[in-house]
């Protein structure tokens, strides 16, 4: 049976962020994730987790100016020091929240920077982050993201991520496999997952097109959930979708697709 975590950035936008922990717990979730904890005091977030009996499954490293359209800085050669400071901040928050894994968004390749420069910067930053996070008992993940939604994003294929893991050479670096992004870029979801399963530490979902609830699009989630169970995946699956309507009213997919 899949272990679903509510992504509080995407879900429950009917209420303020700090009220989404209760909303998720009321809907039966035991784990939560969200993009960034940094706008909030770590103590306040930890209190919400404890109050509602929730596990903090994942959050991202700081990723630049999100509101201005930045989607990560790990491949930016001129922002290495900022990236390193972000690793320290992520460790502080993850430790306070009991979060055992954080995701690194590679970012969009900056204008005037070659793919080779971006690649070298990303690999170097990951070596630094993987080592520092390992010392803190926190796993580092990287996530391929589709270039239809985010044109110019550096990391966009599962095999590309696996090759980067090889190059970094750390036993503390893993893949975050987002089913929605993978469907848009490469398909072959079940076989791709199985081929890289040993290196996948976290899964996320949404349907396509629309990035709405499972069951609203072309992905056969009933088949896919059985395939993940059959493959022995026992990690969390983050629900990172855009509710088509009221979040709680749209939760029927969990029972319908996991029978």
Image (cartoon, rainbow, N blue to C red):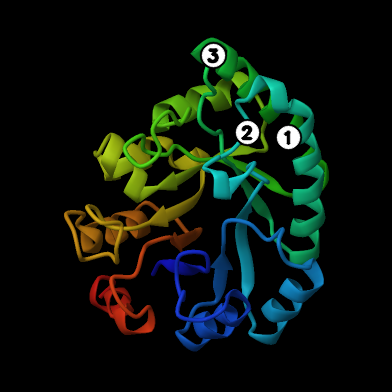
Question: Disc 1 or 2, which lies upstream in sequence?
Answer: 2
Above-or-below relation of 158 to 220: above
> What percent of the width, then of the height, locates residue 129?
73, 35
User: Dots 1 and 2: beta carbons under 8 Å?
Assistant: yes
Left/right of residue 47 with respect to residue 160 in the rendered view: right
Total labels drawn: 3
Residue on which the image places disc 1: 83
Secondary structure, mark 1, is helix
Residue on which the image places disc 3: 112
Q: Nearer the viewer, mark 2 or mark 3?
A: 3
**Crowd tier of the residue under label 1, counting other residues whose Cα lies within 10 Å: few below 14, some 14–19, many 20 or above:** many
**Crowd tier of the residue under label 3, counting other residues whose Cα lies within 10 Å: few below 14, some 14–19, many 20 or above:** few
Question: In which quadrant of the rendered image does the N terminus lie?
Answer: bottom left
Question: Disc 2 or 3, which lies upstream in sequence?
Answer: 2
User: In the rendering, which numbered label is found on residue 73?
Assistant: 2
Between the residue at mark 2 and the residue at mark 3, the CA separation in whole angstroms equals 15 Å
Above-or-below relation of 248 to 6: below
């Amino acid at each position: 049976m899949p272990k679903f975590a509510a992504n509080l950035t995407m879900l429950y936008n009917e209420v303020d962020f700090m009220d989404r922990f209760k909303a998720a717990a009321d809907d039966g979730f035991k784990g939560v994730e969200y993009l960034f904890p940094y706008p909030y005091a770590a103590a306040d977030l930890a209190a919400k987790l404890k109050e509602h009996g929730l596990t903090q499954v994942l959050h991202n490293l700081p990723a630049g100016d999100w509101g201005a359209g930045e989607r990560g800085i790990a491949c930016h050669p001129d922002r290495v020091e900022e990236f390193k400071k972000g690793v320290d901040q992520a460790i502080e928050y993850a430790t306070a929240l009991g979060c055992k894994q954080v995701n690194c968004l590679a970012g969009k390749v900056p204008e005037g920077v070659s793919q080779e420069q971006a690649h070298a910067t990303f690999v170097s930053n990951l070596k630094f982050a993987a080592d520092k996070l390992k010392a803190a008992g926190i796993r580092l993940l990287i996530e391929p993201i589709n270039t239809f939604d985010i044109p110019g994003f550096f990391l966009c294929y599962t095999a590309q991520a696996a090759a980067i893991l090889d190059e970094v050479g750390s036993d503390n670096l893993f893949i975050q496999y987002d089913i929605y992004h993978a469907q848009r870029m490469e398909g072959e979801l079940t076989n791709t997952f199985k081929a890289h399963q040993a290196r996948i530490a976290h899964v996320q979902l949404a349907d396509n097109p629309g990035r709405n609830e499972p069951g609203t699009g072309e992905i056969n989630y009933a088949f896919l959930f059985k395939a993940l169970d059959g493959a022995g995946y026992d990690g969390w699956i983050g629900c990172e979708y855009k509710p088509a309507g009221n979040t709680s009213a749209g939760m029927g997919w969990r029972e319908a697709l996991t029978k």
